[in-house]
Amino acid sequence: MAWAALWQWLSPPGGSKASASQTPPSSCPICGGILHLLDCLDLNRACEDMKGKVLPACGIPIAYYLCEDCGHCHAPEMAGWSKQRFAEAVYNLDYARVDPDYVQVRPLANATLIAALLDQAGVSLSHLDYGGGSGLLSARLRELGRQSSTLDPYLDDGDGLPVDAQFDLVTAFEVFEHVPDVSALVADLARYTRAEGVVLFSTLLNDGQVLPGHRLDWWYAAPRNGHITLFSAQSLGRALARGGFTLTSLNAGLHLAWKSRPAWLTPALLAQIKNSW
Ligand SMILES: [Zn+2]
């Protein structure tokens, strides 16, 4: 059943399509389609809850909306928070409790995999880790003898990079689901990725997990982790197209995007990336 038809079937006759405590957003930020209130989650809902409740409920509701056209799901009110509010309520000293791997385990594991990717490419590639937090991933790559730069727009504005810096390989792990402004993210990636460069990034697609008329009980929908943007395959592809990118999803959580596919990204290298992450 098409998205629009499904929504029509679910909506009560004459009923409003959205009713939240705050003013509902007017349209989907990706495609301009009609949004429907899907669910409200407690701010303390975290990914780690699937292993047992990490934090008690705090009573702050976070509304998630779903686009009937492209399946994009997001939390618009939270996306409008200031950096200060995010720092106080989400990216605070307790953040490691809701995402224990973000401090060391994930950056170091990704650095090892990227080092292998760079070795297999057959040509010298420049690398930027976008949204790299403390910069541990890039630091580890440099320890391993590879070139790597890091930039996290949440923490800085790229002052350390040349104005016209562009890279062959841009990685963005655990970034897309956190961004409040998808357009700004895609514009940034387009800016920093060479015409024949590649963006390698992670985010779990919501297809089959987020459904109209169902509660938002997907473990990945976790405001306490800062997961405010939950892409469908369609919304992710449409968002990246704005930056001139073509999307290739290797699986539900790992993706590549390029403006023009580089010669070094051979089918064998693609297969290696797919099999190693
Ligand atoms: Zn949409």
Image (cartoon, rainbow, N blue to C red):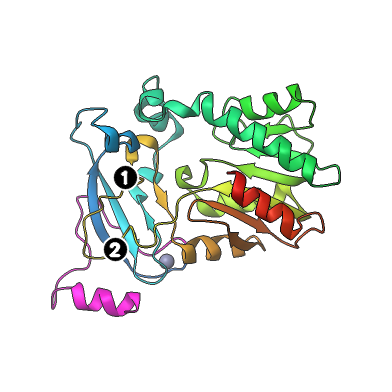
Specify whether 125 is left or right of 100: right
Residue ID at (65%, 32%): 111
Where's residue 31, x and y in %? 46, 68
Q: Main secondary structure of the magenta part?
A: loop
**Amino acid, disc 2:** Leu
Of mark 2 and mark 1, the one earlier in the sequence is 2
Number of labels in the image equals: 2
Q: Residue at x 79, y 36 (%)?
A: 162
Say whether residue 19 is magenta.
yes
Q: Is residue 73 magenta?
A: no
Crowdedness near tag 2: few (<14), some (14–19) or many (≥20) residues, C-alpha within 10 Å: some
Q: Amino acid at mark 1?
A: Trp
The furthest residue to the top = 93
- Element type where label 2 sits in the image: loop
Q: In the structure shown, which secondary structural element does the residue marked by tag 1 occupy?
A: loop
Figure quadrant of residue 114: top right
Observer-nearest residue: 35 or 263?
263
The quadrant where ligand 1 appears is: bottom left
Q: Is residue 97 visible?
A: yes
> Mark number for residue 219?
1
In the drawing, does residue 202 fall left or right of residue 170?
left
Residue 39 is situated, as x and y percent measured from the top left of the image, at: 23, 53
Q: Which range of residues does the magenta coloring cover?
A: 1-30
Residue 211: mark:
2
